[in-house]
Image (cartoon, grey):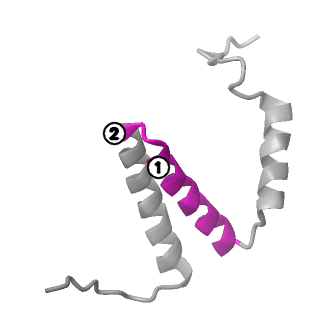
Amino acid sequence: MKNLGLLKKVSGKEYLESLNAKLGEELQEYLDSQSIEELADLVEVVYAILDHKNISLQQFELIRKQKVQERGAFKEKLLLKGVIDG
């Protein structure tokens, strides 16, 4: 006998809340496994969130690149340990 899934169509705030919960779930699965497949699942949820917010991948990439210009990236494998007021 086949298992059947129960589906519920959601939209608006409920859809975004579901995606945010799924993002956390997929992140935990990736952290537990370090699997590229789980990382792909995580990115898929990010794409769904962008789509829901009507943000194109091109817009998202532009925002990402602007942040890299302003704050740097992880390419050099440097982590900020703190900031000294001055």
Quarter of the rendering containing residue 65: top right
Q: Which residue: 42% across, 44% down?
A: 30
Q: What residue span does the magenta drawing correspond to?
A: 33-53
**Residue 82, x across and y down, in percent:** 61, 16
Q: Report helix, strand or loop for mark 1.
A: helix
Q: Residue furthest front?
A: 1
Quadrant holding the C terminus: top right
Q: Which residue is mark 1?
A: 37
Q: Earlier in the sequence, mark 1 or mark 2?
A: 2
How many C-alpha atoms fall within 10 Å of the one at disc 1: few (<14), some, or many (≥20)?
Answer: few
Residue 81's place in the image compared with 32, above or below, is above
Q: Please give the label number shown on residue 71.
A: none
Residue 62's place in the image compared with 68, above or below, is below
In this rendered view, identify the residue nearer to me: 14 or 65.
65
In this rendered view, identify the residue nearer to me: 52 or 4.
4
Q: Are marks 1 and 2 in contact (CB under 8 Å)?
A: no
Quarter of the rendering containing residue 22: bottom left
- Characterize the magenta stretch by its predominant secondary structure: helix
Quadrant holding the N terminus: bottom left
Q: Which residue is mark 2?
A: 32
Q: Amino acid at mark 2?
A: Asp
Q: Amino acid at mark 1?
A: Glu
Q: Which residue: 42% across, 53% down?
A: 26
How many C-alpha atoms fall within 10 Å of the one at disc 2: few (<14), some, or many (≥20)?
Answer: few
Q: Which residue: 84% across, 32% down?
A: 70
**Residue 76, x across and y down, in percent:** 71, 17
**Residue 17, x across and y down, in percent:** 47, 70
